[in-house]
Image (cartoon, grey):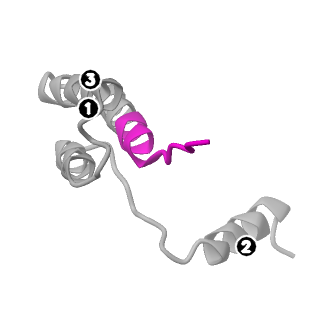
């Protein structure tokens, strides 16, 4: 009988059809920066600042921290603003 954690992992993977494979590489930093630049809200100051910081960190060898910043920038640029 497989462990419960393994079953949960299989179910989770099946529930997400468009899963992305990620890694802690400079290439992934570049991929995130490219995704960010293509987003319509990428010109907002807060998300642009996060992205610039992420790219700088990746360029200075702090790839994991840079990726975290770039991911936050992408999420910020994807946020939909609700206008009352």
Q: What is the x, y in percent for residue 14?
A: 64, 77
**Gap between marks 2 and 1 measured at Cα:** 33 Å
Q: Horizontal placement of 6 versus 36: left or right?
A: right
Position of residue 24 relative to residue 46, above or below, is: below
C-beta proximity under 8 Å, tags 3 and 1: yes
Q: Nearer the viewer, residue 24 or 79?
A: 79
**Quick one: SS at disc 3?**
helix
| Residue 17: mark in rendering | none
Q: Horizontal placement of 8 versus 48: left or right?
A: right
Q: Which one is earlier in the sequence, the residue at label 2 or at label 1?
A: 2
Residues drawn in magenta:
71-84
Q: Say which quarter of the image contains residue 3.
A: bottom right
The residue that appears at 16% across and 24% down in the rendered structure is 56
Residue linked to disc 2? 11
Residue linked to disc 3? 49
Q: Which one is earlier in the sequence, the residue at label 2 or at label 3?
A: 2
C-beta proximity under 8 Å, tags 2 and 3: no
Q: Nearer the viewer, residue 31 or 73?
A: 73
The residue that appears at 51% across and 43% down in the rendered structure is 81
The C terminus, quarter of image: top right
Q: What is the x, y in percent for residue 76?
A: 43, 38
Residue linked to disc 1? 51
């Amino acid at each position: 009988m497989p462990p419960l954690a393994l079953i949960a992992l299989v179910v989770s993977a099946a529930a997400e059809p468009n899963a992305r494979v990620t890694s802690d590489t400079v290439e992934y930093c570049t991929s995130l920066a490219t995704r960010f630049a293509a987003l319509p809200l990428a010109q907002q100051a807060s998300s642009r600042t996060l992205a610039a910081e992420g790219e700088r960190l990746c360029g200075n060898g702090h790839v994991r921290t840079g990726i975290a910043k770039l991911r936050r920038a992408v999420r910020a640029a994807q946020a939909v603003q609700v206008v009352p």
